[in-house]
Image (tube, rainbow, N blue to C red):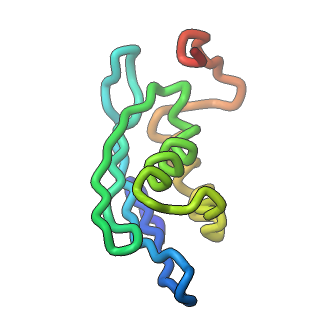
Amino acid sequence: MFEPGHLHIARPALQPDDVSYDLHIRYEVSQTDSGPGMHFTLKGDIKGTAVNESFDLPKDLAYNFASDVSRLAEKHGLPKNTDLHEMHGQYDAMFEDIRDQLDMKSGDPVKPEHLE
């Protein structure tokens, strides 16, 4: 379920070997070391274990939030083959909201130092 500034994704375990998760991704414009960016918070649980992580991304990398969310979720037990992107357009709505909040345009450059 998406609303600006918040994405809630959940999946119950349907089989004994399934992994359940209930995660809230919240985000807001913030000031990073290199200027405007986004502050993200990932809270909820994976397999009944609490998750509470946060991270910041500069404006030019904020569109790549899904990679960081997946990495953190895997750190807390979500299998690597779990596809959090299949949220029926909810990630797309979040992506567009982030672009709008940061006034990002297609073709905006990425700072080379952020790729290191």
- 106 on left or right of 114: right
- Dividing the picture into quadrants, the one containing residue 85 is bottom right
* Residue occupying the point 41% across, 29% down: 37
Which one is in front, 55 or 73?
A: 73
Q: Residue furthest front?
A: 17
Q: Which picture quadrant has residue 111?
A: top right
Q: Name the spot of residue 45 as percent of width and height, x first.
A: 34, 68
| Relative vertical location of residue 106 with respect to residue 54 in this rendering, above or below | above
Examine the rendered structure and indicate whether residue 90 appears above or below residue 5.
below
The residue at the far top in this view is: 113
Residue 58 in the image: x percent, y percent? 45, 25
> Is residue 43 shown left or right of residue 89?
left
| Residue 84 point in image, percent of width and height | 58, 62
Residue 39 placement: quadrant = top left
Given residues 94 and 8, the one toward you in this image is 8
What residue is rendered at 54% in x and 29% in y?
61
Vertical relation: 57 (above or below) 9 = above
Q: Nearer the viewer, residue 83 or 111?
A: 83
Residue 33 image point, x, y percent: 34, 16
Looking at the image, residue 43 sits to the left or right of residue 18; the answer is left
- In the current view of this chain or complex, which residue is farthest to the right? 107
Say if 94 sits above or below 11 in the image.
above
Residue displayed at 42% across by 67% down? 8
Quarter of the image with the C terminus in it:
top right
Total label count? 0
**In this orientation, which residue lies closer to the viewer: 2 or 53?**
53
